[in-house]
Image (cartoon, rainbow, N blue to C red):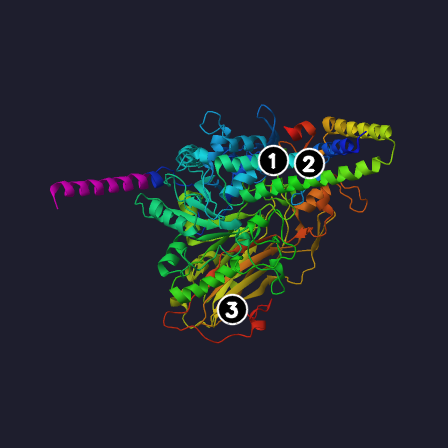
């Protein structure tokens, strides 16, 4: 398997599935994609409805943290892909499929995320993306 | 002057008189006389700070309780709280073990319309992006709207409110009407006088994230057409002017007071001695403020605001927060040093300075407590049954969590008014004359009188209160210099009865009574704490593991105290603090009931704070009376002598004279 493709697979997987904490808020563990999504929604509110006071800071915080979490996801993916590149390609691919598949199932059918900005305290991937 | 002009003026005058007569008749005559009328007054317990589903932040936390529900709860009726099922049925229920005598719903005046629009699909603006965000991502919507409205120096309304915000202001009339109707429906106008309500709202000023909130309470059903909001009127000075022009000076019988709260998170902006334009307060400004701000909420859910914790008065370390700005709630500073002028005692002392400068004390207020509940649950103050107040960052949207509130928050307190009967006129008059006090929750009965010739034997005199009113002044008053005669110093009667603990509520004995004196000398403010009754060396405490009390205390205390350091040329204030023996804090009750064993390391989810040593395990519940002020006679000049600061700030000088 192409090492670049392996890295991209891992990056997409961690970006979509790996829970990152929101440091200023207790009990917030959601994937980078969620922070970006919330940041975009908050920014859209500012553009369409107007924003004053601390609401601009909230947009910056969410978008900034989303970008940082995306970067951390990329670093994580890079490290994992480098580790796997020591193994034969077939085994690396198998390990990738098994681990990411298991993580996807875990994220879909369990409630691994703490979602302080959602409609429930805990949620699975579908709740996080909705 | 033409006939037409004279006719118009006469018609306008006649109309004003008619409105006045009708409104006064409506406000005073439409109730029966109370069967129980006590000329020497009784204490009535209540809550002046209550939020319901009409407050955006309460609704955002899942609160659906209406003003009517809140009043029902205060009267002892069970109400449902979040979480709610898909059909809107409450999954949990709460009931107040001891009903209150009065309650005041004070929803945030800001966002009344926005909240209604975001939840009512029939209203224009319901489909706006911000309303969609509020419904889909409640906490994000909460943060955005709070950020947009409350933390701004120049708050604005969202575009769905129309160019001038008119749509939202118009919609806000609905909840405002419902609030008034609920107050009317629950006010007992029969001779039983069992329960009293007042119409009110909260003006929620928070420039730059600094809390300068005020609760506005109306004397009767005659109120402003629309509540004043921080959005249209973004300064406290603006609020006072609006209350004066739209109520006090409207000529329709309207009466109102404003009650500041949470100066502890005002970052020093609650007690400014400057006007909006930065110039010093003028006499006319101080008079308006003193006319409106008769009381201050010294304690509530989001912390105690009495005084600065430190070696000078160790009892100030009571439910204080480790930050001075409301907006630091989410992330308190690492090394917090309280900024000046965030505590009520400091303001009381500054008021003496202002009076020397202006001739009027703008900070001459009585002390009360209340809850600031956002769960529509007035009076939910019992430590052993606390369900959280759904405010700040503590979400109860999904149900009351295992640890029901922020560890640093507390159940809040109660307001107590000494009045002849439980009716609006009687209770409002008590508020105006500041014959009121606050408690941190328990129903301690506290009395405090100042005079010139009280002696110690009066505590055993059956006619003590007749004598006290005849020869002295109650809490909230100024000492009468004309009655001084040859007395060398004022004397004070201070008395307290322990909370009887009826209806299954735990009750704790009293430990002691203290008198706190503040004064101004040489342009400096000073304070001193005197133990005047009870046992300051008491070793009675509580077992935090079981909440069982250990040791003895007092069921009642009464003493007469004469100020041993009185200087007739020096302005001063005096108030009493009644302190109970230690008892379990709400957090200890929660952890004990959940059988949390910190040693085992097996801590149930959400109860980490049970094993956090920075969270106090016990508290000393208390009551604070309103102050009694002393001003030197007009011909006397203030002394320029400066006391040795170490003496002036010294702590606990046992009473020299009783």
Residue B75 in the magenta stretch? The answer is: no
Disc 3 marks which residue? B563
Q: Secondary structure at mark 1?
A: helix
Residue B47 image position (x, y, % from top left)? 51, 44
- Give the dominant element type of the magenta stretch: helix, strand or loop: helix
The quarter of the displayed image where residue B578 is located:
bottom right
Q: Residue at x 40, y 60 (%)?
A: B281
Which portion, as a residue range, is magenta?
B1-25
User: Is disc 2 in contact with disc 1, using a CB cutoff of under 8 Å?
Assistant: no
Disc 2 marks which residue? A30
Q: Quadrant of the C terminus of chain B?
A: bottom right
Image mark 3: chain: B
Left or right of B473? Residue B507 is: right
Relative vertical location of residue A4 with respect to residue B523 in this rendering, above or below? above
Residue B240 appears in the figure: yes
Q: Secondary structure at mark 2?
A: strand
Foreground of the two, B57 or B563: B57
Query: Could you give the CA–CA distance between mark 2 and mark 1, rounded to whole angstroms?
Result: 11 Å
Disc 1 marks which residue? A38
Query: Could you give the CA–CA distance between mark 2 and mark 3, rounded to whole angstroms?
Result: 62 Å
Foreground of the two, B434 or B488: B434
């Amino acid at each position: 398997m192409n090492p670049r493709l392996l890295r991209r697979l891992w990056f997409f997987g961690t970006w979509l599935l790996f829970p990152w904490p929101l440091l200023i808020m207790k009990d917030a563990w959601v994937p980078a994609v969620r922070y970006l999504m919330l940041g975009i929604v908050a920014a859209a509110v500012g553009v369409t409805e107007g924003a004053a006071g601390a609401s601009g800071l909230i947009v910056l915080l969410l978008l900034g943290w989303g970008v940082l979490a995306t970067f951390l996801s990329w670093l994580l993916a890079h490290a994992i892909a480098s580790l796997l590149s020591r193994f034969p390609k077939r085994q690396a691919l198998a390990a990738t499929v098994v681990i990411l598949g298991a993580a996807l199932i875990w994220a879909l059918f369990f409630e691994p995320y703490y979602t302080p900005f959602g409609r429930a305290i805990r949620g699975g991937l579908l709740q996080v993306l909705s | 002057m033409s006939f037409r002009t004279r006719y118009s003026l006469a018609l306008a005058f006649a109309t004003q008189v008619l409105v006045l007569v009708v409104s006064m008749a409506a406000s005073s005559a439409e109730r029966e006389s109370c069967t129980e009328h006590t000329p020497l007054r009784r204490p009535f317990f209540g809550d002046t700070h209550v939020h319901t589903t009409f407050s955006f932040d309460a609704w955002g936390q899942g609160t659906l309780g209406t003003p009517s529900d809140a009043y029902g709860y205060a009267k002892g009726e069970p109400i449902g709280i979040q979480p709610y099922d898909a059909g809107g049925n409450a999954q949990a229920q709460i009931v107040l073990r001891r009903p209150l005598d009065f309650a005041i719903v004070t929803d945030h005046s800001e966002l009344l319309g926005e909240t209604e629009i975001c939840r009512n699909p029939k209203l224009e603006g319901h489909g706006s992006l911000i309303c969609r965000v509020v419904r889909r991502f409640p906490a994000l919507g909460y943060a955005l709207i709070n950020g947009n409205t409350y933390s701004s120096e120049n708050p604005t309304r969202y575009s769905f409110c129309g160019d001038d915000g008119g749509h939202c202001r118009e919609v806000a009339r609905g909840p405002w009407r419902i609030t008034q109707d609920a107050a009317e429906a629950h006010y007992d106008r029969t001779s039983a006088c069992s329960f009293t309500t007042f119409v009110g709202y909260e003006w929620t000023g928070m420039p730059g994230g600094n809390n300068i909130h005020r609760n506005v309470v109306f004397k009767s059903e005659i109120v402003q057409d629309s509540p004043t909001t921080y959005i249209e009127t973004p300064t406290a000075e603006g609020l006072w002017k609006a209350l004066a022009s739209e109520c006090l000076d409207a000529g329709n019988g309207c009466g109102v007071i404003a009650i500041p709260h949470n100066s502890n998170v005002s970052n020093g902006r609650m007690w400014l001695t400057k006007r909006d334009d930065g110039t010093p307060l003028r006499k006319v400004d101080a008079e308006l403020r003193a006319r409106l701000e008769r009381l201050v909420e010294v304690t509530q859910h989001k912390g105690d605001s009495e005084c600065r914790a430190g070696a000078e008065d160790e009892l100030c370390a009571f439910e204080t927060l480790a930050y001075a700005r409301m907006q630091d709630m989410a992330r308190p500073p690492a090394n917090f040093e309280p900024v000046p002028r965030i505590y009520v005692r400091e303001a009381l002392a500054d008021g003496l300075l202002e009076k020397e400068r202006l001739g009027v004390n703008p900070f001459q207020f009585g002390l009360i407590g209340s809850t600031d509940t956002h769960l529509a649950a007035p009076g939910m103050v019992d430590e052993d049954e606390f369900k959280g107040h759904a405010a700040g960052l503590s979400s109860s949207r999904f149900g009351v969590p295992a640890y029901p509130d922020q560890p640093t928050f507390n159940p809040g307190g109660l307001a107590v008014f000494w009045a002849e009967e439980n009716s609006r006129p009687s209770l409002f008059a008590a508020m105006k004359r500041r014959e009121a006090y606050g408690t941190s929750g328990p129903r301690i009965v506290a009395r405090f009188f100042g005079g010139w010739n009280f002696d110690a034997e009066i505590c055993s005199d059956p006619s003590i209160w007749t004598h006290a009113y005849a020869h002295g002044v109650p809490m909230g008053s100024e000492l009468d210099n004309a009655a001084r005669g040859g007395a060398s110093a004022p004397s004070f009667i201070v008395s307290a009865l322990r909370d009887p603990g009826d209806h299954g509520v735990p009750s704790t004995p009293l430990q002691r009574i203290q008198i706190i004196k503040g004064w101004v000398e040489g342009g400096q403010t000073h304070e001193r704490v005197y133990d005047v009754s009870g046992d300051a060396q008491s070793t009675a405490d509580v077992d935090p593991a079981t909440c069982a009390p250990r040791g003895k205390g007092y069921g009642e205390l009464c003493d007469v105290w004469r100020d041993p350091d009185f200087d007739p040329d020096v302005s001063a204030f005096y108030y009493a603090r009644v302190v109970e023996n230690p008892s379990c804090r709400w957090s200890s009750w929660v952890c004990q009931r959940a059988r949390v064993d910190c040693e085992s390391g097996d801590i149930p989810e959400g109860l980490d704070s049970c094993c956090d040593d920075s969270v106090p395990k016990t508290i000393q519940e208390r009551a604070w009376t309103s102050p009694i002020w002393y001003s030197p006679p007009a011909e006397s000049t203030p002394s320029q002598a400066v006391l040795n600061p170490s003496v002036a700030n010294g702590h606990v000088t046992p009473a020299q004279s009783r």
